[in-house]
Amino acid sequence: MHQAVRIGRDVFKQLLRLEFLLLSIALFQGFRLQSSFILEAVLILGVLLVVQ
């Protein structure tokens, strides 16, 4: 049981890192394209990610 919990934590930790990486890429693209819609959407997703 303990091993399964540890594996689950490791998997979720890696997924969280991937989500932050994709969020930073999307944020970079929003700044690069100077799109207010993309920036607003990414900021909302970022807030949701941090709250999660």
Image (cartoon, rainbow, N blue to C red):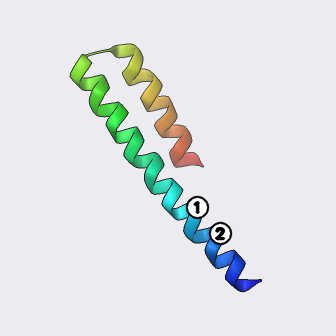
Q: Position of residue 38 (x, y in %)?
A: 39, 20
Q: Find out whether the residues at labels 1 and 2 contact each other: C-beta distance under 8 Å.
A: yes
Type of amino acid under label 1: Phe
* Element class at badge 2: helix
Q: Amino acid at mark 2?
A: Gly
Does residue 5 appear left or right of residue 27 in this picture? right
Left of 23 or right of it: where is 49? right
Write down the residue under mark 1: 12
Q: Which residue is mark 2?
A: 8
What's the distance in space between the residues labelled 1 and 2, CA to CA?
6 Å
Q: Secondary structure at mark 1?
A: helix
Q: Is residue 30 above or below residue 51?
A: above
Asked where in the image residue 32 lies, by quadrant, the reply is top left
Residue 3, given in percent of the width and then of the height, sits at 68, 83
Residue 7: x %, y % from top left: 62, 74
Identify the residue at image location x=45%, y=51%.
18
Q: Is residue 50 left or right of residue 40?
A: right
Q: Residue furthest left?
A: 32
